[in-house]
Amino acid sequence: MTHNLMRITNHESRITDAARGPSPQSPVPSLAVEIAGIKFVHPVLAAPGPLGFGREVQSVVDLHSFAGFITKSVTLDPRSGHPYPQVVPTAGGWLNSQGLPNHGLAGFLTKDLPYLRTLGIPLIVSIAGESVREFVTLAEWLSQEEGVAAVELNVSCPNVDRGLVFGVDPQLTRELVAAVRAVCRYPLFVKLTPNVTDIVPIARAAEEAGADALSLVNTLVGLAVDVHTRRAKLGAGTGGLSGPAIRPIAVRMVWEVARHCDTPVIGMGGIATAEDALEFLIAGARAVAVGSAVIDRPSVATEIRAGLVRYLQEHHVDDVAEVIGSLEVR
Ligand SMILES: Cc1cc2nc3c(=O)[nH]c(=O)nc-3n(C[C@H](O)[C@H](O)[C@H](O)COP(=O)(O)O)c2cc1C
């Protein structure tokens, strides 16, 4: 807390004379951030999902424009995904229900991981399971592999034994994180769902059980209806809302979690510009991740990075760390 207050004070004094704008000799500010011992050259990561496992999009997206890559969630067995359409546009965002299509663990280890290792940026492997046992098995296998910077638990999946999404229940979250923590040799990120009344007890449960970073938010459950056919627009019925529409909710949740937990937070939800990213950083996220925006603008990470540099120069801030957690709430 004291640390945060110092940051706010620093931030204030720098903002006061910010109106002058960058001087010709403004030094290039440092964008480097560190999370769980992983060094990221800047704070903009690729969120899990829209970029799949990288190979599919390498001809259109420069994956090196991201400081780190979080994979689409890998499951134990291959999954073909939900019926089409899997993604539909909505006002201010997208609704998707892909059903986690992926090659399964064996396919990931033989087809996807060898390519992802060649990228040379920190690789965070997202995993999803229907039981604690499945998550544990996935983490055990990944722990035998090289070239993985961290494992991320996608807790937005239903637990078949309890008929409940892991991440809506603090106790389920705690049990899952503790069980995976016990077998995983890599830092453990936990990706939280926003589909809860209060995210703080879930974040705390993940932290107490050994999470090294908290990623938030995943998509918000929604339903879009085709009024002519009177059917759901998505093949699977309901789906997850992403994009600008969810940003204020995501920023609010990041702020709440960052205030109540010491674990570093990775913020996401509707980030498409440097200003969007800054909202999350100022609210307390140590890094951000971009998902849906890449669908329309493959160069989005490069643009955000450049915009962050401009912002810091204009405000005479020489390290992005100084803006992190500097939010003042009136
Ligand atoms: C098409 C699509 C697929 C996604 N797949 C995953 C996934 O496999 N695992 C996961 O943790 N999140 C997944 N997400 C959620 C994103 O990582 C992110 O949390 C969410 O979309 C909010 O960020 P955005 O508004 O920048 O997209 C997916 C999102 C989209 C749009």
Image (cartoon, helix red, strand yellow):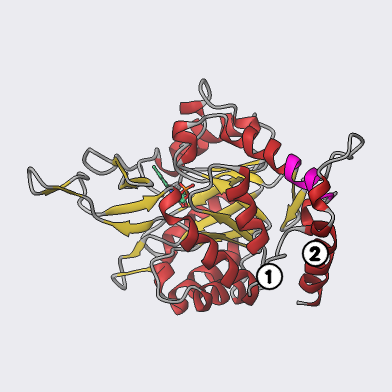
Q: Is residue 314 magenta?
A: yes
Report the side of 262 relative to 113 (left or right): right
Q: Position of residue 96 (x, y in %)?
A: 32, 46
- Using a 10 Å C-alpha cutoff, classify the residue at mark 2 as few (fewer than 14 neighbours), some (14 to 19) or many (20 or more): some
Q: Which residue is mark 2?
A: 12
Q: Residue at x 34, y 53 (%)?
A: 240
Magenta region, residue range: 309-316
> Disc 1 on helix, strand or loop?
loop
Of 221 and 281, nearer the camera is 281
* Residue 55 seen: yes
Q: Are marks 2 and 1 in contact (CB under 8 Å)?
A: yes
Q: Main secondary structure of the magenta part?
A: helix
Report the side of 110 relative to 261 (left or right): left
Q: Kindly indicate the quadrant of the structure image that contains residue 44.
A: top right
Q: Residue at x 41, y 50 (%)?
A: 242
Q: Which residue is mark 1?
A: 328
- Using a 10 Å C-alpha cutoff, classify the residue at mark 1 as few (fewer than 14 neighbours), some (14 to 19) or many (20 or more): few
Callout 1: CB less than 8 Å from ligand 1:
no
